[in-house]
Image (spheres, helix red, strand yellow):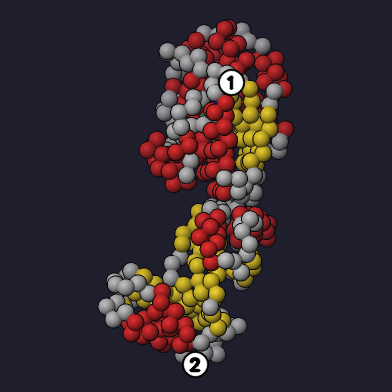
Amino acid sequence: MKQVILIRYGEIFLKGRNRSFFERTLINNLRTAISTIPCRFTKLQGRYLVDEFKSEDCDRLVEALRRVFGLHSLSVAYHVDTDLDAIGAICAQLAPDYGTFRVTVNRADKTLPMTSIQLAQHFGGYVLDAHPHLKVDLYHADKEIFVDLREDKTAYVFMDKIPCAGGMPVGCSGKGMALLSGGIDSPVAVYRMARRGMEINAVHFHSFPYTSLMAKEKTLDLARLLTPYTGNIRVFVVPFTEVQQAIHAHCPSEYMITIMRRIMMRIAERLAIANGCGSLITGESLAQVASQTQESILVTNHVVKTLPVFRPLIGTDKEEIIKEAREIGTFKTSILPYEDCCTVFLPKNPIIRPQLEQTEIAESKLDVEALIESAMAGIEIVDIKQGEC
Ligand code: ATP
Ligand code: MG
């Protein structure tokens, strides 16, 4: 009796003309996700199988696999020869102690002398003998035991279908440049775009020495926490202090944040284009703060000339974002108390509804091009590899 993991993928993307590209990408991502754990990966008809692993590695494998986008569910199963009594005994072993259950049989092996229903009754008999308090309920069973009888005279027996992350395999939807702060929102935005199949590069603006080096490390840690979902992330760390000092010295204080954001977007777009990214990604959510009103977003967006800007959280409440951040595992790191560069020189009254013309006038006091070039000359590239955390 051998423990294996059965993996089911989401059906939708495997239909149509791009099928082989999607599937190759998914298989690559799965292999990479488990590459540090000794095991064997096999493609079966309509699903995948992982076996030949040590039983103590099983939970780690499950955790790594269920974060790979494009999967529907997986199960830890026993793989045995098709011996109906032995299978009955495994069903009895898997069954819970109380409540209701059913056995569901899939019989690919048509040479067996019984129908699927008769086989289910046969295995159910073993369960009831071992657990007389259990009751069969075919429609609303608390637990379902699955027996999959294959044509090669082997069978998979399992109980739970563990839900996976869904979505599309990362790499199927091109590459995006995410503006990654150390806050709660942008890591969730990255997660959502990666879930739609997007490979991720990230840009982080930091204001050393106004913000500590820990603020940068925190953002890199967030990127590390995201890699089980996204795969490797290349992070461009941009020194932003000079830009902020210049805005502070030359522009009206209420425009500080608006102008800062416009320069961030310009740098992000240049980096995106230079690195083969087809979009920008931010963690903005409408009306969350002054810089996230329709007018602010219009004025900020105006400087982005050639790429779409994705804001996957635009209609999401903070509470929902926090819940998602907890689920994906970034929340605790996001709330560590290191300041973001946006808090440096923070004006008392940031403009809530900036007008484009006034903003451009306010910004005209700066040599924007020189500031961008100088910031970009100081970029540090950090490659975060999947499996680093
Ligand atoms: P977050 O929690 O993602 O920091 P926020 O609610 O704090 O978002 P803002 O600080 O207004 O909102 O930032 C809006 C978006 O701008 C962020 O979601 C992120 O995409 C980008 N951003 C903000 N600060 C930085 C930074 N230091 N580096 C890179 N991107 C940033
Ligand atoms: Mg922030």
Q: Earlier in the sequence, mark 1 or mark 2?
A: 2
Under tag 1, what secondary structure? loop
* Relative to 226, residue 208 above or below: above
The image shows residue 4 at horizontal and vertical percentages of 55, 70
* Relative to 174, residue 162 above or below: below
Question: Residue at (47%, 16%) from the top-left corner?
Answer: 346
Q: Viewer-proximal residue, 241 or 106?
A: 241
Question: Residue at (48%, 41%) from the top-left corner?
Answer: 330
- Going by the numbered disc 1, the residue's amino acid type is Phe
* Relative to 3, residue 172 above or below: above
Question: Residue at (55%, 37%) from the top-left corner?
Answer: 221
Report the side of 230 relative to 253 (left or right).
right
When asked about the image quadrant of residue 361, the answer is top right
Under tag 2, what secondary structure? loop
* Relative to 196, residue 40 above or below: below
Badge 1 crowding class, 10 Å Cα cut-off, few under 14, some 14 to 19, many 20 or more, is some
Position of the C terminus by quadrant: top right
The image shows residue 213 at horizontal and vertical percentages of 57, 26
| Mark 1–mark 2 distance (CA, rounded to whole Å) | 74 Å
Callout count: 2
Any mark on residue 208, and which?
Answer: 1
Residue 26 appearing in the image: no
Any mark on residue 113, and which?
Answer: 2
Residue 33 appearing in the image: yes
